[in-house]
Image (cartoon, rainbow, N blue to C red):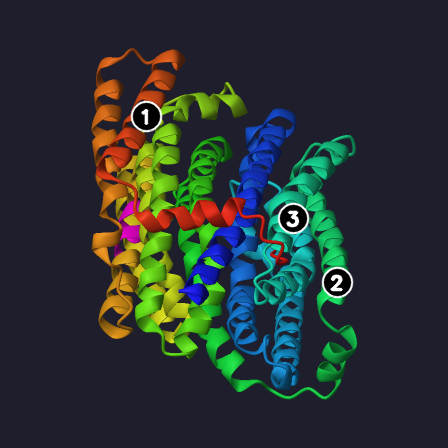
């Protein structure tokens, strides 16, 4: 069917752009590497804790609004008679996030220091680091709202360029330059602020290329509340705050339990490396999200279910070999950052399993959100947050960083189970298991090969590499033997098509 083929090609091309953005995000580990090499693990530990707190602040003030702009703008962007509504949505989003990020800036400069002195007394220099990093919040808000607006037009390149490449690149550059000024976490905070300020300037220029600044400012001047956006965004903000709270919960609980900066940096580095696996899902998710909003509005649930299953299969096909490589080479990757790290790295296997599960089944969360059910997602977030807090409180005092990893895995399993049940039972948009089982089957076979290599070969770099390559080869052969789905050709056709239609 021509329309479905066009959608598949748009998904594939948008995914290619996002995947290139994912590759560009490998600069973020390069930034961390520079931090560990120049500033040392103690300063890195302070920065990681501060960054987790800032990410939670971004979620509370911005993330739900960003999703709301993407969802509502996707509904109106192709209809000329609905352009005023689209600009009203954008104006509401800007006013909302700039006000609340301003509140956070004021709060951080008035009440942060005594709170940190009480709850993070063993973490030096945390308060001034957070105070400077939080100044970047309004700039981050502006950039991400504009990127969401462009994605509603299925233009994905700005997300890849600004947030995928230039953000970690600028962090890398400024961290290196500011080291000459002072070798502490405040210098890293300034690098964070300057990078996001420059990105915001670039984002405004991008907005002016695709939208009308005059129409946006006119909507701001005659501000009218877009109730649907606010009703959607507030629960989603809270939900994503809970999500990022849970993502950094292990780090925070290790700090609460008296672990020092170096131990926290070891766990945080391993978690950050593994978390990059989720970028595979994000690459597909950003291209798939506008499709969810459009198909659901038109009542095309069966077609949406088919696209959902197809994209899930693509995600698993790419995430599985990367997972195998990551867990096989985990020690070698850790040592690239600092030879001072020692101890058991098996916690990274647990975190990698959690990240793979989130990749494989995480699109359900986007379906719940982009069909307008942000309150469901808030309920999910509250349940999973309670579970995560309980797991961390029980497991970290007993098993330390392994306990933190187990808590992450447990919370992830609860989260994906809730959301997939809702898409299946409540929204009637199920995963079609007959369309997705083959990459899972191939992955299981490859895991058995990995386990054999891990158990019998000596713990040296060449055996880790041999195990990784062997298990990845087995995955590819098993998938080929099981048979690629015929419509997977659409992904490659979309990636390499010479179609001149402008895509992001």
Among the two numbered marks 1 and 3 on one chain, the one whose residue lies closer to the N terminus:
3
| Mark 2 secondary-structure assignment | helix
Among the two numbered marks 2 and 1 on one chain, the one whose residue lies closer to the N terminus:
2
Quarter in which the C terminus is drawn: bottom right
Instruction: Decide whether the magenta segment is chiefly helix, strand or loop.
Output: helix
Image coordinates of residue 176 in percent, x first then y, are 72, 32
As measured in the structure, the alpha-carbon distance from the residue carrying label 2 to the one carrying label 1 is 46 Å
Residue behind mark 3 = 161
For disc 2, the neighbor class at 10 Å (few under 14, some 14 to 19, many from 20) is: some
- Toward the viewer: 380 or 370? 370
Relative to 300, say whether 4 is above or below: above
Report the span colored magenta: 409-414
Judge left or right: residue 492 versus residue 103. left
Image coordinates of residue 130 in percent, x first then y, are 62, 51
- Toward the viewer: 65 or 261? 65
User: In terms of image quadrants, where is residue 25?
Assistant: top right
**Residue 432 visible at all:** yes
Judge left or right: residue 216 versus residue 488. right
């Amino acid at each position: 069917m021509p329309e479905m083929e066009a959608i598949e090609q748009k998904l594939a091309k948008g995914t290619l752009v996002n995947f290139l953005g994912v590759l560009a995000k490998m600069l973020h580990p390069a930034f961390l590497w520079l931090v560990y090499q120049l500033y040392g693990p103690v300063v890195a530990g302070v920065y990681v804790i501060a960054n987790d707190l800032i990410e939670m602040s971004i979620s509370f003030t911005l993330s739900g609004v960003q999703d709301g702009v993407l969802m509502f703008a996707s509904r109106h962007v192709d209809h000329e008679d609905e352009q005023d509504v689209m600009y009203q949505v954008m104006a509401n989003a800007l006013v909302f996030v700039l006000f609340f990020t301003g509140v956070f800036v004021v709060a951080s400069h008035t009440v942060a220091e005594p709170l940190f002195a009480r709850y993070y007394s063993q973490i030096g220099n945390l308060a001034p680091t957070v105070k400077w990093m939080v100044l970047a919040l309004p700039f981050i808000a502006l950039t991400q709202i504009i990127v969401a607006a462009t994605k509603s037009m299925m233009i994905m390149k700005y997300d890849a360029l600004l947030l995928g490449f230039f953000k970690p690149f600028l962090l890398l550059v400024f961290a290196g330059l500011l080291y000459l000024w002072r070798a502490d976490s405040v210098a890293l905070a300034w690098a964070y602020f300057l990078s996001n300020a420059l990105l915001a300037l670039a984002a405004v220029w991008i907005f002016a290329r695709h939208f009308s600044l005059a129409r946006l400012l006119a909507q701001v001047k005659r501000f009218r509340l877009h109730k649907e956006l606010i009703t959607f965004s507030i629960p989603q903000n809270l939900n994503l705050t809970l999500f990022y709270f849970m993502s950094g919960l292990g780090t925070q609980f290790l700090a609460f339990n008296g672990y020092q900066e170096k131990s926290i940096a070891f766990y945080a580095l391993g978690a950050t490396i593994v978390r990059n696996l989720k970028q595979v899902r994000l690459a597909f998710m950003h291209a798939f999200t506008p499709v969810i909003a459009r198909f659901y509005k038109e009542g095309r649930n069966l077609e949406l279910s088919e696209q959902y299953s197809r994209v899930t299969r693509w995600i698993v096909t790419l995430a599985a070999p990367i997972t195998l490589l990551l867990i096989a080479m985990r020690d070698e990757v850790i040592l690239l950052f600092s030879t001072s790290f020692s101890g058991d790295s098996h916690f990274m296997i647990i975190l990698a399993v959690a990240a793979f599960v989130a990749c494989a089944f995480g699109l359900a969360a986007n379906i719940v959100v982009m069909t307008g059910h942000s309150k469901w997602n808030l309920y999910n977030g509250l349940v999973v947050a309670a579970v995560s807090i309980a797991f961390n409180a029980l497991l970290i005092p007993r098993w330390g960083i392994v306990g933190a990893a187990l808590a992450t895995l447990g919370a992830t399993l609860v989260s994906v189970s809730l959301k997939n049940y809702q898409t299946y039972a409540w929204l009637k948009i199920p995963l079609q298991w007959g369309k997705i089982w083959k990459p899972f089957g191939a992955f299981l076979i490859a895991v058995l090969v990995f386990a054999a290599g891990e158990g019998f070969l000596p713990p040296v770099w060449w055996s880790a590499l041999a195990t990784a390559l062997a298990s990845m080869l087995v995955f590819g052969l098993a998938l080929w033997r099981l048979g690629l789905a015929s419509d997977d050709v659409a992904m490659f056709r979309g990636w390499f098509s010479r179609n001149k239609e402008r895509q992001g």
